[in-house]
Image (cartoon, rainbow, N blue to C red):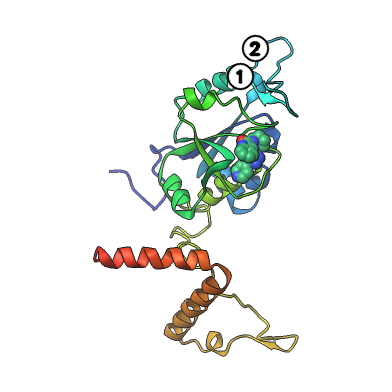
Amino acid sequence: MIADRGERAETAAAWRATVLSLFPEMFPGPLGVSLAGKGLDAGRWALDVLDIRDFARDKHRSVDDEPFGGGPGMVMRPEVVDAALQAIEGRPGPLICLSPRGAPLTQARVRALAAGPGVRLLCGRYEGIDERIFAVHPVEEVSVGDYVLSGGEPAALVLIDAVVRLLPGVMGNEASPGEESFESGLLEYPHYTRPAVWQGLEVPEVLLSGHHERIRTWRLERAEEETRRRRPDLWAARGETEKSRGARGR
Ligand code: 9WO
């Protein structure tokens, strides 16, 4: 048996994001700094970015064409995207296209992705990708919010960031981050640091008390209050989860 000091076993491959993009220089971008960047350098996760243009066949390396039916902008050509998808067929993880018409990304999905071997992300540009790609390839569409971007890349960065911070060793402490927004179905409780009085505003007395049980209760109550007030939709969904848990006897 190999000595285990709580580090990733050398035989297990690191969690891997494989990205298809027409703008590969957008990666790792913000994921190259701070704790995610250190984790990347340390090999706790891996990032492969492939330039979709490298899969263009014609001499002009064209990746787009005019939309049938007319209208503004250009559409990504199916043969080019197909060749790029074939090139990443053996790679780890589900194949996801970032799109406003996809299923909303949730912390539950992020957790599931972090528990798997990786993810393959297809980033669209222009007006979108020829629809027939989705008939030929089992691509799941995922949205990071109800707005339109100029391409899927910023959404891909969001998804990878959310996953990578859950990987063992990436955020510094080996234990999972837990106890924060969404892990419990609640928004975060308010945070305070020194000084204890700032611009005449005092830090809630309970936080200075050293009374850990009272602090825990205060934080839970404040988190519940903030969730009810700011995100009644989340609060209602959490209520449903609690009910079904209770019905199944937990
Ligand atoms: C844009 C669009 C708008 C309305 C309904 C469906 C749609 N699909 C797309 C789309 O796939 N667009 C491609 C990627 C090409 C144009 C820019 N793209 C994009 C992705 N814009 N916004 C996103 C996105 C991805 C994930 N979460 C939020 C927005």
SS assignment at label 2: loop
Of mark 2 and mark 1, the one earlier in the sequence is 2
Q: Which mark is residue 65?
A: none
Q: Residue at x 45, y 86 (%)?
A: 214
Q: CA distance from mark 2 to mark 1?
A: 8 Å
Q: Are marks 2 and 1 in contact (CB under 8 Å)?
A: yes
Q: Which mark is residue 80?
A: 1
Image location (x, y in percent) of residue 216:
45, 79
Q: Residue at x 63, y 24 (%)?
A: 52
Amino acid carrying mark 1 in the image:
Val
- Quick one: quadrant of the N terminus? top left
Where is ligand 1, by quadrant? top right
Residue 80, picture quadrant: top right
Q: Residue furthest front?
A: 69
Of residue 224 and residue 70, the one placed in the foreground of this image is: 70
* Residue 213 shown left or right of residue 56 in the figure: left
Q: Which mark is residue 57?
A: 2
